[in-house]
Image: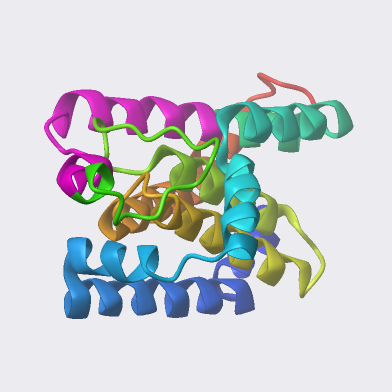
């Protein structure tokens, strides 16, 4: 079982993950954080406003932990591993946001003059925050959940959709002016690495010692 999951790490969905992450790094190098946010904000339209306003909730903590609980009821072993990944992810992200990088501000702080004079596109119902920008918590959570499920999935193509979903949710954080590109990329990286470590090291430690019965 463990060998099968480790083999998944070099399957198609990881190639897609690497490709999209590389695109993000390339955009960051070319446009930088502020300019990329300005470009994205200038591309607003009513359809995208509504689309990203709602899809961003896939990265909300209540949603991802609800999905993890569903997995827990369906399969105690898999659900436990997903929950452990999400808990580690949440603790790490909050420490980084509120302790290590507590002085990193969100786009609304840097673009407050544009917001004040009405030249910055805003979305009704979306509250903007100024503090705790790096890394993106929504991005980290959705990547942690999606990559955990990808490791568990036997189907070949469904994991590709999960990777796309994770990146779309991550991009929504930029579109909604909640985070910069670097915040999302950092969240994506952290959220993707934690499930690998959990399934490779923590899960075997727990279940091989029969601390939790399948």
Q: Percent from the top left, x then y, of residue 149? A: 69, 51
Residue 38 sits in quarter: bottom left
| One can see residue 134 in this view | no
The residue that appears at 85% across and 26% down in the rendered structure is 73
Q: Is residue 138 magenta?
A: no
In the depicted view, which residue is nearer to us: 6 or 95? 95
Please report the bounds of the magenta region as a residue range: 85-113
In the depicted view, which residue is nearer to us: 66 or 11? 66
Up the image or down, 151 lies above or below 99; here it is below
The residue most toward the front is: 117
The residue most toward the top is: 211
Residue 128 sits in quarter: top left
Q: Is residue 99 magenta?
A: yes
The residue that appears at 66% across and 19% down in the rendered structure is 211
Q: Percent from the top left, x then y, of residue 97? A: 26, 31
Left or right, 76 with reference to 96 = right
Q: Main secondary structure of the magenta part?
A: helix
The residue that appears at 27% across and 25% down in the rendered structure is 95
Left or right, 63 with reference to 187 = right
Q: Percent from the top left, x then y, of residue 61? A: 57, 29
Left or right, 49 with reference to 105 = right
The residue that appears at 54% across and 33% down in the rendered structure is 86
Residue 77 sits in quarter: top right
The residue most toward the left is: 103
Colour treatment of the image: rainbow
Up the image or down, 197 lies above or below 44; here it is above
Q: Quadrant of the image for the N terminus?
A: bottom right
Q: Percent from the top left, x then y, of residue 140? A: 45, 44
């Amino acid at each position: 079982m463990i060998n099968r999951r480790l083999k998944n790490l070099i399957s198609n969905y990881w190639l897609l993950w690497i490709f999209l992450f590389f695109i993000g790094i390339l955009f960051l190098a070319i446009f930088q954080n502020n300019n990329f946010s300005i470009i994205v904000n200038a591309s607003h339209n009513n359809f995208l406003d509504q689309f990203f306003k709602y899809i961003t909730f896939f990265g909300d903590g209540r949603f991802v932990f609800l999905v993890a609980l569903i997995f827990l009821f369906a399969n105690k072993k898999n659900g436990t591993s997903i929950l452990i990944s999400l808990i580690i992810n949440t603790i790490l992200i909050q420490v980084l946001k509120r302790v290590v990088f507590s002085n990193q501000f969100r786009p609304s702080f840097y673009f407050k003059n544009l917001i004040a004079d009405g030249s910055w596109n805003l979305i009704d119902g979306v509250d903007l925050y100024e503090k705790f920008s790096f890394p993106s918590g929504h991005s980290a959570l959705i990547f942690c959940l999606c990559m955990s499920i990808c490791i568990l999935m036997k189907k070949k193509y469904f994991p590709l959709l999960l990777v796309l979903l994770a990146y779309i949710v991550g991009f929504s954080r930029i579109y909604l002016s909640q985070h910069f590109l670097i915040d999302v990329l950092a969240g994506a990286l952290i959220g993707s690495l934690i499930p690998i470590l959990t399934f490779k090291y923590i899960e075997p430690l727990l279940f091989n010692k029969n601390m939790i019965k399948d």
